[in-house]
Amino acid sequence: MQKTIIKNERVREEYQIIKHPSGLTICLYPMKGFSSAYALFAAKYGSVDVTFKTREDNDYVTVPEGIAHYLEHKLFENDDCDAFQLFAKTGANANAFTSFDKTAYLFSCSQQFEENLKILLNFVQEPYFTDESVEKERGIIAQEIKMYEDDPGYRVFFNGLQALYHNNPVRIDIGGTTESIAKIDKELLYRCYKTFYNLNNMVLSIAGNFNVEATLEICDRLLKPAPDLGLEAVFPDEPYEVKARESVQKLTCAMPIFNIFFKFPAFSGRESLEKYIAYNIIAETVLGKTSAFYDQMLNDGLINNNFNIGVLDGRGFFTLTADGESSDPRKVFTKIKEAFKTAKQGNFSEQEFENVRKKTYGELMSMLGSVISAATSVMDAYFHGNNLFDTIEITADLTYENAVKTLWELDEENSCISIIEPA
């Protein structure tokens, strides 16, 4: 095995990254003084990965939207029972999720860690699909899709992404559509499983109270070696400009809700992480709950305590977002754009920036006190080509001058608003 120790002198912490002979990357973060452990077995495979090729393919293949989510549903079952039943016997809490750019299977436990790890490694590596079970799952997923079609919070977000992006598959619901999942069959599921659940495209991330030697021994026994397929996932060309300035839908809700997006070109690697941190701190400084903007908007009755800001980024997409409830969402949109413009003109408080930066640094440090946050952050960092401590270092080193330069890269007019109005 090829082992790398990732250390950080600032926080005096370390974890291991091991390239296992099977092809899997294993990230191990033993945490002293903790009674529980958290493990994620994840594939670099999400809803955006619909066009791809391997060395075995003559050309790029495009599959129906929603197939990554479909696979996640099906993988918990085998010909004997489902994995949830096995975890229930050990007392572990198990779950899975599919996001835009990854799929993860996970458990947390305070006892029988090694037994739980065996369950996790076994069921993720043993797909079992039949025509009958795939057809049954189609109905379940179709019901889930239809349920979200009537969810105001869900729809305001995805309607906004559809206004923001012309071609990028992030604009499609993670579960796909009823039309797209109708095209999914057993053969397609096996093909995508073979392609994306190759161990060279996966990571095992573990943090908390566990025995490193016993963990690696289990990995040696249970991991099934896989050849590197030379997987390439690609995205269609995406114009710089937003597709539409506004999206409006009527659904059942008490008052209008909104989601505002500022579009950026896609970033990758360390640059993506630097932009992610900088724009989170910038947005919090200009619009956050300690800003003059927030107080004024609250006093004017344009927003309430449900106002949130953040950054959404991943493979092929990057956007700064603001969401909340308002009797006049369009006015909120105008006021936010004006706030960024005046910040560029000098109304960007260095003292407030430093307060937010230090607060962000403290929150990142507290993350190291949670086995869930630590294991999840290690997984995310690996898939983005970074390490767990890069986030802390970038935040600590971010200067006011660099934040001002980054602020000027924001094009406040390259933006859109999604609104859900009460039916």
Image (spheres, grey):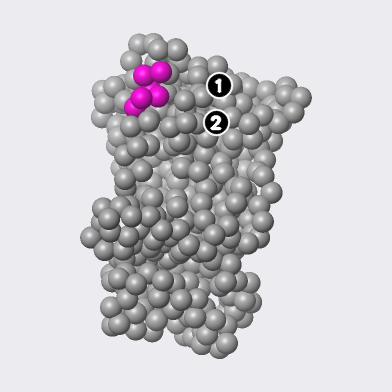
Decide if residue 163 is in sight here: yes
Distance from disc 2 to disc 1, alpha carbons, whole Å, reads 9 Å
Depth check, mark 2 against mark 1: the one in front is 2
Q: What residue appears at the point 61 percent right and 58 percent down from the top-left corner?
A: 272
Q: Which amino acid, by three-letter code, is at mark 1?
A: Leu
> Most extreme residue toward the right, as rendered?
58
Q: What element carries label 2?
A: loop
Q: Are marks 2 and 1 in contact (CB under 8 Å)?
A: yes
Q: What residue appears at the point 57 percent right and 25 percent down from the top-left corner?
A: 192
State the quadrant of the N terminus: top right
Q: What residue appears at the point 26 percent right and 63 percent down from the top-left corner?
A: 255
**Residue 134 rendering spot, x and y as whole percentages:** 42, 18
Q: What stretch is highlighted in magenta?
A: 135-140
Q: What residue appears at the point 56 percent right and 50 percent down from the top-left corner?
A: 314
Q: Looking at this view, is 45 or 338 the one in front?
A: 338
**What is the quadrant of residue 306 in the picture?**
bottom left
Q: Looking at this view, is 173 or 93 the one in front?
A: 173
* 319 sits to left or right of 325: right
Q: Mark 2 points at which residue?
A: 64
Q: Mark 1 points at which residue?
A: 188
**What is the quadrant of residue 37 in the picture?**
top left
**What is the quadrant of residue 69 in the picture?**
top left
Q: Is mark 1 on a helix, strand or loop?
A: helix
State the quadrant of the C terminus: bottom left
**Residue 291 rendering spot, x and y as whole percentages:** 39, 80
> Most extreme residue toward the left, as rendered?
254
The first of marks 2 and 1 along the sequence is 2
Secondary structure that dominates the magenta span: helix
Decide if residue 270 is in sight here: no
Q: Which amino acid, by three-letter code, is at mark 2?
A: Pro
**Residue 128 rendering spot, x and y as whole percentages:** 45, 15
Task: Examine the structure image and report whether residue 130 is included in the region drawn in magenta.
Answer: no
